[in-house]
Amino acid sequence: MLTESNSRGQSAPSSTTAHYPTIVADLDTSILRSQGHLLGLQTPEGCWNAELMVDSTLVSDMVAYHYWRGKISPQWRRKAVNHIFSMQLPDGGWNIYYGGPSEINATIKAYLALKLAGVRDTDPRMLKAREVALNLGGVPRMNTFSKLYLALLGLFPWEYVPTIPCEVLLIGKWFHVNFWDMSNWSRGMLVPLAIINHFKPTRPVSVTLNELYPQGMNERDLALAPDPEKISWRNFFLWLDRLHKFAEWFAEHKIHPFRKLALKKCEQWMLERFDGADGLAAIFPAMLNSLIALHALGYPDDHPQVVRALAALKELEHETADDVRIEPCFSPVWDTAIVTVSLHESGLAADHPALKRAVQWLIQKEIRFRGDWRHKNPARVEPSGWAFEFENKWNPDVDDTAMVLLALRKIPTDDPGKRDECFRRGLQWMMTFQCKDGGWASFDKDCTKNILEKVPFADHNAMLDPECADITARILELLGYEGWTRDQAQVRRALDFIREHQEPDGSWYGRWGVNYIYGTWQVLRGLRAMNWDMGEPWLQKARLWLESIQRADGGWGERCNTYDDPVFKGQGPSTASQTAWAVMGLCAFDDPANPALKRGVEFLVQSQNPDGSWTEHETTGTGFPKVFYLKYDIYRNAWPLLALASFKKLLQRPNAGQTRPMDGHPHPDMEKNAIIIRPNFARQ
């Protein structure tokens, strides 16, 4: 018989199992296997930290860096070559997500790394790569950051690399567009790049890429194309870039009036943010850029800052006897919060030692420092929040904070007062980040000035940090469990944001997960937590959309190409994580007799491995849409457990099958050990 664990870990009989006689017997077994697998992955410190898997570009970039420095271990080089070749596609190129097509930046970076490492031009694999690179447009079609790395090696002319002026840090917040209007991650990448751009520390290598310039190195092919409209922001910024390059001549001759001051400010900004972080911004691009910037500034190899920066990058490497791969960053806070919620929701007792250790670890990771968020959010609130990584005190984010609060609210600790104070601070801090239109973004508040997307070096598609439905809905989920209602002004504004951003077919765009399945699931789960009437037509439209894209095997899948063209939404091989999201989205309608829900649960139960894990090859996480994607290895195991737990609770719910408003009644998730803090603060 299907059973439910209460807060003391005891079993109570289920209310019904009639809807699913064929899978009820397997549901508890599947949950127990999953719990056991995840518990076995917990570190002695109490956290979970699964690998973040990405494309080949990080290893390619490190190969280029080592050759720029003129120092590379032959053993490491061999492993890097093996890794890059292992990710080559049958057509000869390299992609940026599993199952995706060859991509220009990844392909040329891999080709260059292999060429630097000594692979012969006549190698059949290199010939195929060269053909793909040329068909994609060659070097001139690479993005700005990629061209800058080539310029460092003497393989691309600096005069055609868009200028990243150091003076951007001198522009105060009084100016309409300033440094703090850029996204958090762009700031971390651009400051060291501005230093590099000033010094232009070119160190030519013994290879060339002449064969990858389809029209040769002429201005027509190298210069950025202007906007056909004569009067446009893009053309204005292209003109401004030419002005910057004219100013660069004066800087080179040491007569630039502000350059010395700006350069020093960039250096100080960068060094200051090394403190309390796993490298600059705790992400690979900023960390590598900062290391190159230190070299450009003249820091010797044995300088503590250089040693520290290089060690932080080395920490991201996974080296085996024949391979080396690199993570873009660590994700322990995010992973720990998701697994903690999943384990508890699936019936693990709230006072289980593993959960108590996890929550204690999360409490210790609260950031009590007023970081860079203060520039866009000057609210007088106690510093709080959580970052994604082990250490990143400058950059706590809203999404991680919401997920941590979902974990903290139901797990008792040996010091409940400390837990409650931590929760209160985090909630108050998070609520001050609501943006003007009612939504929440990831790191900053109202970081949405589209003009920044027109600057020449903004082709990495990440200059802004826009509000999104998935984060906003996760916050609504938390607020619903905490007793907030639609009467609250901030909740009303968030709900308006959600409704305004629904797609015509009923789905929602997912900024941080791939893609519409992620956004739609989170919205439906959030609104159910708010006790919304799930029978309303606009939400039934979302249900019908989820059901319409279910695959023949009972699962759901979607690939990253949906960010390039929404025509592909809901299409892709079934995955454990995306099926879990869809199952949880359908569970929000309280209808255990839904055939699509039954088939989705069956897919998860039947595709589970004997050790309690799930196998997943697809990329389901989003870094920068269209540019960089992530495969969270924890997703394939944590989300399915939470989905099975949600379904199990649905079976046991006395009023399952009724989609009606429940205002005035406590949400089913409000149970013993949960913190209930009423919304009498953080009003905007």
Image: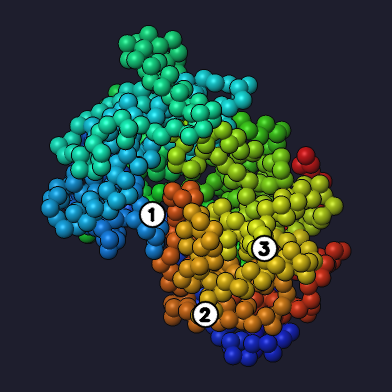
Let me know if residue 233 appears in the view.
no
Q: Quadrant of the C terminus?
A: top right
Q: Of discs 3 and 1, which sits in the foreground?
A: 3
Going by the numbered disc 2, the residue's amino acid type is: Ala
Which comes sooner in the sequence, label 3 or label 1?
1
Secondary element at tag 1: loop
Q: CA distance from mark 3 to mark 1?
A: 29 Å
User: Extreme right residue here?
Assistant: 664
Which comes sooner in the sequence, label 3 or label 2?
3
Expressed as whole percent of the image width and height from the top left, the position of residue 19 reads: 68, 87
Above or below: residue 261 compared with residue 94: above
Going by the numbered disc 1, the residue's amino acid type is: Ile
Secondary element at tag 3: loop
Q: Identify the residue at horizontal 60%, vertical 22% (top origin).
A: 175
Q: How many marks?
A: 3
Q: CA distance from mark 1 to mark 2?
A: 27 Å
Going by the numbered disc 3, the residue's amino acid type is: Gly
User: Badge 2 is on which residue?
Assistant: 552
Secondary element at tag 2: loop
101 sits left or right of 132 in the view: right
User: Badge 1 is on which residue?
Assistant: 96
Query: Few, some or many C-alpha atoms within 10 Å of disc 2 (few <14, some 14-19, many ≥20)?
Result: few
User: Badge 3 is on which residue?
Assistant: 506
Query: Few, some or many C-alpha atoms within 10 Å of disc 3 (few <14, some 14-19, many ≥20)?
Result: some
Q: Place residue 368 in its image quadrant.
A: top right
Q: Nearer the viewer, residue 502 or 596?
A: 502
Q: Identify the residue at horizontal 57%, vertical 42% (top origin).
A: 465
Expressed as whole percent of the image width and height from the top left, the position of residue 115 reads: 18, 46
Let me know if residue 20 appears in the view.
yes
Q: Identify the residue at horizontal 18%, vertical 54% (top origin).
A: 127
Pointers 3 and 1 in contact (C-beta within 8 Å)? no
